Structure formats: structure tokens, C-alpha cells
Image (cartoon, rainbow, N blue to C red):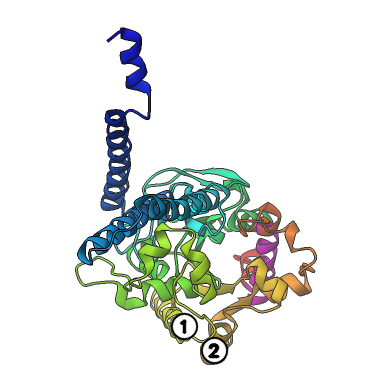
Amino acid sequence: MSLNTKIYQYFNPSTPQNNSFWKIIIISNILILIAVHVMFYALTHCYLITSGIFLIIIVFACIYYLIMFIGKIFRRKFNRVIIRTVVFSIAIVLLLLEGVFVITGFKSTYHEKRNKYFYKSHYIPDDYSYFHLWSKNHYLQTDEYCFFRSVNSLGLSDCEPQLKKASGEFRILALGDSFTEGDGAHADSTWLRFLENLIDTLPIKVPLSYINAGICGSDPLYEYMLLKEKLLKYHPDLVILALNSSDIFDVILRGGIERFCTDSTVKYRKPPAIEPLYAMCHISRLVFEKFKWDEFLIGDYMKSPLPKIAAEDIYSSILLFQELSNKNGFELLIVFHPFKYELENNYLGLIDVLEKTELKTGISCFNMMTYYQNIESMDKDNYGIYYWEVDGHHNAKGYAAFARGIFLKLHQMGIIDSLMNYGSE
């Protein structure tokens, strides 16, 4: 046999032994990639966004061999070529569709759009400590923006706070989630920084300092624990707690104060058993959507009792903040601020919590949505000036408006006047 003949047979796909060789190569690579996905999940508890592709391969391979196995049991001769063609054709169509969904981001969750490469469950903590904090410097990044954050020793995106207060110093501490950290804007364009700039324009002789304790993905229960265990030692004079409707979903998924275990770890609520299918396969989300299941996997939101339970947990956390305020002598202001879709629908998701807090406690509250509408003239026609179109966080203009609202509220509370008149007879 000539060398040319040997080469031809080696690369000729119709040669029987070569068919087996290429089958082994293809199957081996598929198994390796499946193993990579399994290992990634084992190490991170997250699903790579390509998991759906391999899930489809596994499912349809099982279907094909199951049909063949059934044929053997019942001694029925199936036409392998026809069955293989039908099964593989359906699989290829679904694979292509899944690939298009992954590449375009269609039906991707919020975390997938930000993390790009993997699905992260809302039911799994970033870590299992009492504190939801940053462990390192990071970027707040989406397809629309990218802003760097430097983290201090507390795990906060802020400069290092001074433990000892100067004589007569007035210290303002801001607590909240990504809107307080300033996601969507430069570190110099958070609402707390804009508030500082506004106060600096006034003839105030009192030394002022500010601590931004906003953390992306935080919620009132985490913020309470952070204040109680780590930040009270800085002796704040004013604590501003910023809340929004995302806190409802956070508490639904994570639980209330019971999430904090006696061994200094946290334990979230259990995810639904269907979560792996939703997490791995973008196509499956079309079916979930028909039954009103979104990425939070709580079913029909309007019919579920969970939002009311979460609202009660948020109100209970407010009472815990009030208790800390009374014991430690700081002023407490709670700001309820809207997402852009709430402006569009003219409905604040936490309105019941706000009204209950105003009615049953003496805590100062501020409805930022009312301020946006009546003073800043925000509505469904112009809110795009203040929010990022896709991501939904404020841009610098939005955070500046946020700061003006709080500045007005501090005037109404008499805090600004007391600072301006401090030391005068």
C-alpha cells in the first residue's frame, strides 16, 4: 500500500476505522467539557452560561439510547438512521437556539449580564459570614459603563474612616445597596459625595465627615448587622438608610433576621428544586416565563404571600435600627427611593412599609419618589436622563438629584440649621 493511499484512508471519513476514531475524539472532548462544567459548579456553586448546550447534548443522547434500549426489550427493530436523524435534528435546532440565546443575552438574568460567563443563584450567599462586604478592589461594570472602586479595610468602597472623632465633629453614615455605593457612576459621583458637596457650600464651622457603607447587593438586615457589629464604634451622628423595592426580593430569597445563625454564619432560604433547569438552560426560561416564574423563582408575584412577609421583615429591621438609634444617640433618616420602572408606573414598591413606619414610629422618613416627581419633575418621559437605560441604576445626574432630595430633607429635619448655628449664642 502506497503512502498516498494510507494518508487518504486516514483522513477519509468514510473509512470505518476512521469513523470510530473521530467518534472517540468528539465524545472525549464533549466529556471533558462536561467535566469542566461540573467542576466549575462544584468549586463555585455557579453554572457556566454554556451549561444548557451540554444539557441538551446529554438529554438527547439519553433519548436516543433509551429508544434503542426499548427496542431491544420489546424485540422491535427500529430504523436507526431515521431515529438518529430525527433525534439529532431536533437536538441541533435546540443547540443552535440555545447558542443564539447565550450569545445575544436573550433571557439572561441580571447576574449573567453583569458576570458575563455564569449564572449565580440568588439563594447562595457570596460568603457565609454575617457581613455582606467587598473582599477586594473591583469594577462596577456593565455593557453601558465601567467604574473602579477601591476598598478600605472594612470592605467598603470608600476611603479609610478615622476611628477617633475630632472635637465637635459631625459624622454622617450612609447605609444601603448599590444605589448608595454608587453603581453606575464614578466614585466621586455617589449621592453621598454630592450631598457632601452641597453641605460644603454652606457656612458651617463644624467639622464634618462622611462614611459610605453602601454595598452592591446588600439589604436592610445585612446593613443592620454591619452597623451594629462594625460601624457603631465610629460614633455616627446621623445614619441615612436608603431602601428600595429590590430589598423585598433580597429578603424573600435570604430571609429575615433568622438568616443569621448562632455560629456566625448565614443561611438563606432553600431554592426551588427546579432552579438547576432554569439556571442551566436559557430555552427552559421561555417555559418558566409562561407560568410567571422569573429569575427569582417565586412564581406569580402578585399572588404570592412572600412579598408581604418580606415587607414585614423589612419593617422589623427598621425597628431594630430605631433601637440602635435610641441606645447610641444618633439621628436616623430612612430614604425610600424608586427604580425607573416605578416612576414609569407611578408606584413605589415599598409604599406600605413607608406609610407604616411613618404611622407607627417617630422615625424620619423621606419618599424620594414624591420628591423626584414634584421637585425634580421626573416622569416616564424623562427618567432616562437620570437612569442608565438597560442596567437601571442612576447615572451621575440621578445621584445628584438623589443628594438634592436628602439635602432638602435635612433642612426640613433642622439638621442643616443646627450645623450652621452650632456654637452661636
Q: Are marks 2 and 1 in contact (CB under 8 Å)?
A: yes
Q: Name the residue rendered at 24%, 72% in the picture.
A: 261
Q: Name the residue rendered at 51%, 88% in the picture.
A: 361
Residue 21: x %, y % from top left: 28, 31
Residue 380: x %, y % from top left: 76, 69
Q: Is mark 2 on a helix, strand or loop?
A: helix
Please name the residue that numbered disc 1 is placed on.
315
Label 1 sits on what residue type? Tyr
Q: Image quadrant of residue 411?
A: bottom right
Q: Image quadrant of residue 366?
A: bottom right
Please name the residue that numbered disc 2 is placed on.
356
The segment highlighted magenta reads 399-414
Decide if residue 271 is in sight here: yes
Q: In which quarter of the image is the N terminus?
A: top left
Q: Name the residue rendered at 34%, 15% in the picture.
A: 7
Residue 219: x %, y % from top left: 45, 68
Decide if residue 155 is in sight here: no
For mark 1, does the 10 Å Cα neighbourhood hold few (<14), some (14 to 19), or many (20 or more) residues? some
The vertical placement of 100 against 191, above or below, is above
The vertical placement of 23 against 408, above or below, is above
For the image, the number of numbered tags is: 2
Q: Quadrant of the C terminus?
A: bottom right
* In front of the other: 326 or 301: 301
> Between marks 2 and 1, how big is the CA–CA gap?
8 Å
Q: Residue furthest top?
A: 2
Residue 126: x %, y % from top left: 35, 57
Label 2 sits on what residue type? Lys
